[in-house]
Amino acid sequence: MISQSAEYSLRAVLCLADAGAALTTQQIALVTRVPAGYLSKVLQNLARAGIVSSQRGLNGGFTLARPPTELTLLEVVAAVEKSRRIGECPLAIPEHAVNLCPLHRRLDAAAEAVERLLHAATIADLVKESKNEPHVHACHANKEPCHARHVALRD
Amino acid sequence: MISQSAEYSLRAVLCLADAGAALTTQQIALVTRVPAGYLSKVLQNLARAGIVSSQRGLNGGFTLARPPTELTLLEVVAAVEKSRRIGECPLAIPEHAVNLCPLHRRLDAAAEAVERLLHAATIADLVKESKNEPHVHACHANKEPCHARHVALRD
DNA sequence: CGAAATCAGGACTTGCTTATCCAAATATAA
DNA sequence: TTATATTTGGATAAGCAAGTCCTGATTTCG
């Protein structure tokens, strides 16, 4: 549905929204269980796309560049991978330049449905949802280190 | 949304349904504009999955193994790639074994929407649709060789 | 039977995504 | 200023999907 990088991006952004403070790559990697070295690249892309802000040096790290209430899942995904919507006939058939054939109309409809769903929820929505479920913490966090981390962050 | 192989599979199956007769790999490749060598692998997979039947030797080729009215797009796609539905927490978090976290619930909903759309149409539906659009022939066919081929097949 | 047509399957290449690792730049704190 | 914590960016490898090519097995036709 979405690439691994896109899933990692969503987990990282959720983690940052939940923390509400700057987190280092290492911290995000622990919480989200994303390989730290690769996460570094993902965060770099998110920074270039203006989704997160980065700060180097001691006490540096990453923060959300925009309020989570105004950041949809789709925006995060779109920042790291191109849309799967079918704009023009993949077979370059002239007659289909405007009107897609029945097959590609269906495939495009599927892509549209996915984007619509991803656009319907903000990062803040998901953070709030997970807070409302007492025994089910956010899936962007792992079990042991996560709890420790959350406690630490809130002290 | 779906893999390249899955798209090739759909084009090939539509082509076979439209022809209503056995077609060789070369013929399907011409009409669908799929690389012949690769299409050979795709058709092999479809045969193993029971979607098409193969016949070797002179006058051999591929035919649909089942009536197109009872073959959904989803069945064709599922024959060549695994479902994107999220059955269990990708982070293996125990609490999420049954209940997915908000993020993965959304991602699974997106996958479900795609599969629902692909399940809602049969191969026969698409063939019929393209026949109803006089100036827009099926996108599984290319322009020049396609017309020639169709004429040839119907003689 | 022999020739031609056709699928089956294996070996291999290519390109992209995912992933690892390290040196360099930069920011903070004491 | 010096030590330390961090991101940045490059080089590189591993894994998988996509694509190519060739040989062998099978079927039909004359």
Image (spheres, coloured by chain):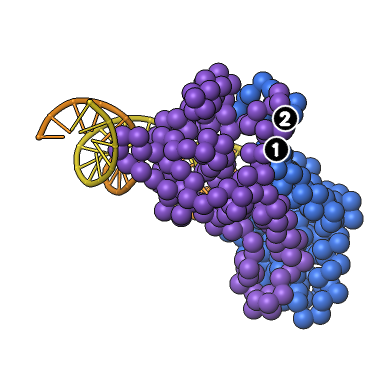
Chain colours: A purple, B blue, C yellow, D orange
- Mark 1 highlights which residue? A129
Q: Residue at x 46, y 54 (%)?
A: A50
Residue B10 lies, in percent from the top left, at 72, 56
Residue A112 lies, in percent from the top left, at 70, 59
Q: Compared to B37, does A98 lie above or below? A: below
Q: CA distance from mark 2 to mark 1?
A: 7 Å
Residue toward you, B19 or A121:
A121
**Amino acid type shown at disc 2:** Glu
Residue A28 lies, in percent from the top left, at 47, 33
Q: Residue at x 63, y 24 (%)?
A: B93
Please indicate, yes or no, whether residue A46 appears anywhere in the rendered image. Answer: no
- Mark 2 highlights which residue? A133
Residue A91 horizontal side relative to residue B154, left or right: left
Q: Compared to A72, does A145 lie above or below? A: above
Q: Secondary structure at mark 2?
A: loop
Instruction: Classify residue B152 by image quadrant.
Output: bottom right
Residue A92 horizontal side relative to residue B108, left or right: left
Q: Secondary structure at mark 1?
A: helix
Residue C11 lies, in percent from the top left, at 47, 38
**Amino acid type shown at disc 1:** Glu
Chain bearing tag 1 is: A
Instruction: Classify residue A10 by image quadrant.
Output: top right
Residue toward you, D27 or A80:
A80
Residue toward you, A69 or C10:
A69
Q: Indicate the quadrant containing the C terminus of chain B: top left, top right, bottom left or bottom right.
A: bottom right
- Disc 1 crowd rating (10 Å Cα; few below 14, some 14-19, many 20+) is some
Number of marks: 2
Q: Residue at x 84, y 56 (%)?
A: B121
User: Dots 2 and 1: beta carbons under 8 Å?
Assistant: yes
Q: Residue at x 55, y 50 (%)?
A: A67
